[in-house]
Image (cartoon, coloured by chain):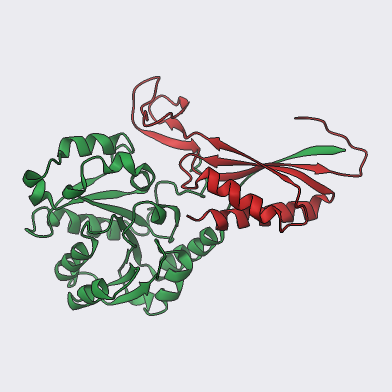
């Protein structure tokens, strides 16, 4: 329901980074938390729509969903949540703080530069 | 040569920025801001009417009322003695921080102790829009069914308190308080549940106490929980 405003914020961030980095944007990676309140399909659509209006209309939008991850207050274990199983698998406690999966993050950009410093990681 | 630039940056939306500004305004004025969320018809307005009547002598209170259409709820709250600023959202299914910021100009915040924000009746979208509030309350009611926490986990997970209204109707429905508590515990541990009936008055004292305690706690680090779009709290 607010995926367009999220997509605008993501592209704003991308444009700020590209102004700093220079070069041509090939792809962007976005992680959508399962408890972020954003719908991944709608966000992907909105990001694609805005890509067409950007300076890099051919940039590929790669989106992955990130499960809710909790840190148990009892034993400190970190665990991913599948479905509604929110209890700590180590000690059974229901008392945990979210460590991942509550937000939307811009993870990385693939950028084509003229520079010599090649990095083929990933 | 293509290269991958790692950023790993949380996305802060325009609403998040405006909400942070609202939070500063509440804090500067020393007013407790409470965001009430629920399905349509759970009893948010009736709860605020009762609150106006019961706590009007103790606190200076005001309300921002979000509704798609009509001023029915705003008029009811005003009639109960709480000044109310109406936001008609048209088709909008939630309040956003920009709307609340403009509505706040109707009040002198410094003259208030408690500001209630009655969100649009909807358990999905309001959960995604931070209004800078100190406390979030989800109101649920027995005719809606006992599995609401499981069906709307994001909204319930963000709550600081759950009001279970229309408890007087529990015998007339298939609602199980035990099942409701179990579903809720599956979403968030140790969430206060206030069982009450605005119709009969049963349990309302617990709500008035919760408001009073929240107001008294102002000044101490009060905000809790995490919001979509807001980074998780740092681990201790």
Side of A59 relative to A71 (left or right): right
Chain identifier of the green chain: B
- Residue B22: percent from the left, percent from the top? 46, 66
- Residue B192: percent from the left, percent from the top? 24, 45
- Residue B228: percent from the left, percent from the top? 47, 48
In this rendered view, identify the residue nearer to me: B172 or B216.
B172
Q: Quadrant of residue B70?
A: bottom left
A69 lies above or below B109: above
Side of A4 relative to B34 (left or right): right
Side of B234 relative to A11 (left or right): left
At 42% from the left and 65% from the top, the residue drawn is B92
Q: Is any atom of residue B117 visible in this view? A: yes
- Residue B55: percent from the left, percent from the top? 18, 67
Q: Colour of chain A?
A: red
Q: Quadrant of residue B39?
A: bottom left
At 28% from the left and 35% from the top, the residue drawn is B185
At 31% from the left and 34% from the top, the residue drawn is B186
């Amino acid at each position: 329901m607010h995926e367009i405003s999220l997509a605008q914020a993501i592209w704003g961030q991308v444009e700020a980074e590209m102004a700093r980095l220079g070069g041509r944007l090939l792809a962007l990676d976005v992680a959508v938390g399962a408890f972020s309140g954003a719908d991944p399909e709608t966000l992907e659509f909105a990001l694609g729509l805005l890509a067409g209006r950007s300076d890099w209309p051919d940039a590929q939008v790669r989106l992955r969903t990130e499960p809710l991850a909790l840190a148990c207050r009892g034993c400190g274990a970190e665990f991913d949540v599948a479905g509604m199983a929110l209890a700590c698998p180590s000690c059974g406690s229901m008392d945990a703080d979210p460590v991942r999966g509550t937000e939307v993050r811009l993870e990385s950009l693939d950028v084509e530069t003229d520079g010599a410093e090649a990095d083929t990681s990933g | 040569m293509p290269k991958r630039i790692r950023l790993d940056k949380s996305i802060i939306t325009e609403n998040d920025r405006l909400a942070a500004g609202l939070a500063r305004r509440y804090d500067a004025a020393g007013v407790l801001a409470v965001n009430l969320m629920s399905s349509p018809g759970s009893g948010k307005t009736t709860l605020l009417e009762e609150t106006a009547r019961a706590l009007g002598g103790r606190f200076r209170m005001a309300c921002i009322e979000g509704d798609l259409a009509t001023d029915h709820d705003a008029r009811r709250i005003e009639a109960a003695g709480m000044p109310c600023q109406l936001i008609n959202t048209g088709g909008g299914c939630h309040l956003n921080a920009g709307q609340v910021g403009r509505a706040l100009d109707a009040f002198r915040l410094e003259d208030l102790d408690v500001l209630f924000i009655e969100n649009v009746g909807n358990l999905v979208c309001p959960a995604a829009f931070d209004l800078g509030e100190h406390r979030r309350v989800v109101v649920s009611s027995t005719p809606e069914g006992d599995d609401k926490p499981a069906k709307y986990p994001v909204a319930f997970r963000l709550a600081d308190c759950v009001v279970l209204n229309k408890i007087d109707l529990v015998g007339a429905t298939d609602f199980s308080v035990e099942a409701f508590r179990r579903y809720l515990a599956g979403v968030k541990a140790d969430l206060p549940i206030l069982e009450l009936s605005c119709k009969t008055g049963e349990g309302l004292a617990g709500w008035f106490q919760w408001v009073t305690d929240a107001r008294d706690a102002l000044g101490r680090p009060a905000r809790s929980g995490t919001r979509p779009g807001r980074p998780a709290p740092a681990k201790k």
